[in-house]
Amino acid sequence: MTAEAQIKDTITANDVVLFMKGTKSMPQCGFSSRVAGVLNFMGVEFEDVNVLADENIRQGIKDFSDWPTIPQLYVKGEFIGGCDIITEMTLSGELDTLLEENGVTFDKDAADKIREANA
């Protein structure tokens, strides 16, 4: 199976997917850690894909999204963005709206706490 086919299968089979360096329980870079930390804190169930475990996926996801950096977040098969975009969306409340509109369960109180802590 090609990297592109694997990526398509993964983002189709899971509502929320984070392509990251490391895993959600053990991120291996600060940017991946930040996004995984936000999702974990907000109680979002997501599939983590460790790009360090497969060079074809590591390069393949960059080609697939036409986005040069990792991590990359997908919701319902749609590329949302990387660390800076997810951080901005979390702080503005846009991530809450996106998750709600796509029927993804999350802890609204936790999302509010993130915003309060960063106000």
Image (cartoon, rainbow, N blue to C red):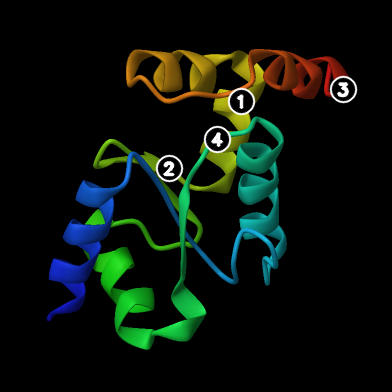
Residue ID at (60%, 39%): 39
| Circle on res. 8 | none
Decide: few, some or many residues near mark 3? Use Cα within 10 Å; few <14, some 14-19, many ≥20.
Answer: few
Which residue is denoted by mark 4 in the rendering? 44
Which residue is denoted by mark 3 in the rendering? 117
Q: How many marks?
A: 4
Comparing labels 1 and 4, the label whose residue is closer to the camera: 4
Decide: few, some or many residues near mark 4? Use Cα within 10 Å; few <14, some 14-19, many ≥20.
Answer: some
Quadrant where the C terminus sits is top right
Question: What amino acid does circle 2 point to?
Answer: Gly
Drawn side of residue 40 relative to residue 70, left or right: right
Which residue is denoted by mark 1 in the rendering? 90
Quadrant of the rendered structure where residue 118 is?
Answer: top right
Residue 92 horizontal/vertical position (percent): 61, 15
Question: What amino acid does circle 3 point to?
Answer: Ala
Task: Identify whether 60 is placed above or below 16.
Answer: below
Residue 11 vs residue 115, the one in the foreground: 11
